[in-house]
Image (cartoon, rainbow, N blue to C red):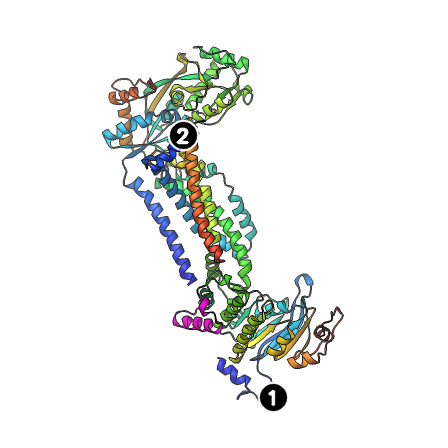
Amino acid sequence: MQDFATTLWNAVGLILLGDADLIEIIALSLRVTLSAVVIACLIGLPLGALVGAFRFPGRGVVTVLLNALMGLPPVVVGLVVYLMLSAAGPLGPLRLLYTPTAMIIAQTILVTPIVAALTRQVIEDLHSEYAEQFASLGVGPLDRVAALLWDARYSLLTVALAGFGRAVAEVGAVIIVGGNINHVTRVMTTTIALETSKGNLELALALGVVLLAIAVIVNAAVMALRASAVRSAYA
Amino acid sequence: MPDACLKTIDGGYVTPASAPAPLLMQARGVSFRPQGKPLVDDIDLDIREGRRLIVMGSNGAGKSLLMRLLHGLIAPTSGEVVWRGKPLDRTAMREQAMVFQRPVMLRRSVIANLQFALAVRGIGGAERRRRVEEALEQARLGDLAKRPARVLSGGEQQRLALARALACTPRLLFLDEPTASLDPASTLAIENLIATAHARGITIVMITHDKGQARRLGDDIAFLHAGRLVETGPAARVLETPSSGAARAWLEGRLYLDDLSSPHTSPTP
Amino acid sequence: MFRRQFLSLALAGTLAATLAAGGSAPVSAADEKFIIVQSTTSTQNSGLFDHLLPIFKDKTGIEVRVVAVGTGQAIRNAANGDGDVLFVHARPAEEKFVAAGDGVKRHDVMYNDFVIVGPPSDPAGIAGSSDVVDALTRIAAAKAPFASRGDDSGTNKAELRLWKEAGIDIGAASGDWYRETGSGMGATLNTGTGMGAYIMTDRATWIAFGNKGDYTIAVEGDNRMFNQYGIILVNAEKHSNVKSELGQTFVDWVISEEGQAAIANYKVDGQQLFFPNAPAGS
């Protein structure tokens, strides 16, 4: 382990030198994760806003369900998606198993409840501030949801970030539905798992540090955006 | 529409000068009793077109609740609110506007706050631009148009809230202590805006704790005590010679704790 | 205004999602000439595929996508039709797979052998032994920790067979000195070396393994630890999506003279890891 620093330095060197394999793996990680987060937001933001802004029968149940689904075990999601996409499964003819699309599907299922549940909280808080003014102005249901989502946009960035964090660090689901196929479905986390199983612990750790660095960069960028919003009292 | 109102107020062709202005809104036995607790209790109240009604009373008397019941933000437990002869509904609400004690500012620019209020009423294009311009000018917020609304001072925010309400050209404007936490200069600016609105024929219902403000802006006063309407009448009369014990005590700065049946004057002046 | 902003936001999101989805499409659509091989961690982790597949692709233009899991899971995946070729090491299970109609025909490909690795302290006193049954009996007698894959893999099946041969009921010792990790070969090596346990591993994985610590091979050279690999084309009659032609091309190449030579040529640290033994002309 004493040469961890050397290995880490080598890994950073690989990126700086533009090692094609490593860059391909990082690019696929980002593509899969960002796609899943975007799709999860397209579903989770309006869903969370609806639950957060309106009273309806069964609302409590939906809220509990969303919160509980935040803790979905990735391996279970991976298995379910595998069974769906397997040639023997109902969606087999789509031939999506062992493709990045399968990984995006699995991560979308993992991330959507997180986005929806956290959005519900954010929107509910904002709505308690806006509700009377909206009622007084006569804002209709659709406009209400749109306005709440727009006005909460900077808080919702943090929500998307939470989803990103979950997806980018996830290995259990993507390794089952992706198969960790070299140059096709190998991402950062599955590479780390593979290198660990090969006993290359330093390399695995170095890759982990690279993954962490990516997460830090993404978080810092979003936080900088948010900080400017706070100065405008938009957040 | 404002022109028609003006004529009526000025005692034009419709009614003789001595007769009261036509009814705009009426509360008929309106009560609000969550879990049986009478927070607003059996209130009958007439609001007449073009008049400025001041609602007074001590903290917890139910003034804000009554205003929300009249505006339709809360449904009464019993009784009904009548708007121009018909039960209050969503369409009626669109002819009203309300400014809250703490202005609710959307997390957007000043101009976007105005645009939003007009957009939800389906007002767009050149008409919206014209009204936004007018509102900015009236509230003297033209220089701040692009600024985030939530970084404005308290006075500026309240001016924007009032301008936003007026841009929707309501017949009736509810004001819930609009100057409660403002400095005198800001208070004056708000009072001027209210006066302008009234001059355009908009009926005003306003809650205030400030006797001076009530005298400056009020035509009539409705006095609430413990959820009940204990006195109504022309502002000067109620302020000078209150007939109810509760109003007298409050105006003299005494605490009034009598929860027994207080004198119940007729709701019509 | 706000409506327009919201709309543009939603639009941008949809666009990004479409791009992302579209971006993944060409991999499977435009590049149709690929097969999926369900295989085991030992072949993958030892680096054999990284050596073989580029040679095969240069010759045929066929891309081979390897899903490396335990033999048990590989067989189950293939039985679901999620693969074109099965390349594993558990002969009885492979024959069952063919008998059930999931596979076309099984071919021997190569072999290596299993070894038992252990810590320098050698608590069971088995270092240097070439009698695996005797060694296992000693481990059980000494109640020395033993880490098993416990994952129904080829290695796991072979190990269980040897315990049975030694007449030891490891079920009773499970959780005591006999510890099932329920994971792959590499993970079991990481765990086992961490707890000072003996571990049975295939030689290829061990040689390529990067976290040996002070562990060495304790038991080797017993012909009961022979580890035979087989290759099977998944049966298109049962699984219609199987790319029979491409799959057969791969199977034929692996057992051809050229493929067999490529396997023999693969060396790590100068050591040959796999020994080709496909019957000539098959």
Identify the residue shown where x is 50% and y is 41%.
Answer: A72
Magenta segment includes A208:
no
Residue type marked 1: Ser
State which quadrant residue C62 falls in.
top left
Main SS, magenta region, reads helix
User: Which residue is the site of mark 2?
Assistant: A6
Q: Which mark is residue B203?
A: none
Identify the residue shown where x is 34% and y is 48%.
Answer: C19
> Does residue B168 appear in this view?
no
Task: From the image, state whether disc 1 or disc 2 is nearer to you.
Answer: 2
Badge 1 local density, few (<14 within 10 Å), some, or many (20+)?
Answer: few
Residue A160's place in the image compared with A3, above or below, is below
Say whether residue C98 is left or right of residue B229: left
Could you say whether the residue bearing mark 1 is in a helix, strand or loop? loop
Q: Position of residue C160 (x, y in %)?
A: 47, 19
> Does residue B136 appear in this view?
yes
Query: Residue lying furthest left in this view?
Result: C59
Q: Position of residue A103 (x, y in %)?
A: 40, 40
Q: Is there one chain holding both mark 1 and mark 2?
A: no
User: Which quadrant holds the N terminus of chain A?
Assistant: top left
Q: What's the CA distance linking mark 1 and mark 2?
A: 97 Å
Q: Chain of mark 1?
A: B
Residue type marked 2: Thr
In this picture, which residue range is highlighted in magenta?
B121-145
Residue B225's place in the image compared with C173, above or below, is below
Q: Position of residue B78 (x, y in %)?
A: 64, 68
Could you say whether the residue bearing mark 2 is in a helix, strand or loop? helix
User: Which residue is the site of mark 1?
Assistant: B18
